Amino acid sequence: MKIHAPADHVIARVPPAVIVEAIDEHTCYANVGSDNAHELALWLGLIDADLEAGDDPELADQLRQLAARYTRAAG
């Protein structure tokens, strides 16, 4: 998963088992997984950075659902 944040930022927010590799000083790749796309979308929100769902339509759908829920909650 490509994350638009420095590797140090991401490493500080994920479990030690997640492998994070710097792409450059502002972007990294994180090898993350979960039991299902919904849980993964929730965990990715804790990283507190922009990210790309890549070619995973199920994850993209879950991210859209969470975004809509948070938008409704914010009024």
Image (tube, grey):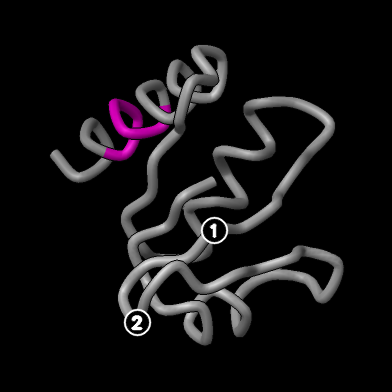
Q: Nearer the viewer, residue 7 or 37?
A: 7
Query: At 75% from the left edge and 26% from the top edge, which residue is drawn?
Result: 36
Q: How many marks?
A: 2
Reply above or below: 26 against 45.
Answer: below
Q: Which residue is mark 1?
A: 29
The amino acid sitting under disc 1 is Tyr
> Residue flagged by tag 2: what amino acid is it?
Glu
Q: Residue at x 37, y 71 (%)?
A: 5
Q: Cα distance, mark 1 to mark 2? A: 12 Å
Magenta residues span 66-70
Q: Nearer the viewer, residue 1 or 48?
A: 1
Q: Is residue 12 left or right of residue 32?
A: left
x, y (%) of residue 13? 60, 76
- How far from the left and from the top, in percent, is residue 57? 49, 13
Task: Give how far across and how far down residue 21 sits, in percent.
Answer: 60, 69
Is residue 36 magenta-colored? no
| In the image: residue 37, left or right of residue 36 | left
Reading the image, the residue beneath label 2 is: 25
Q: Is residue 10 above or below residue 8?
A: above
Disc marking residue 54 = none
Image quadrant where residue 23 sits: bottom left
Element type where label 1 sits in the image: strand
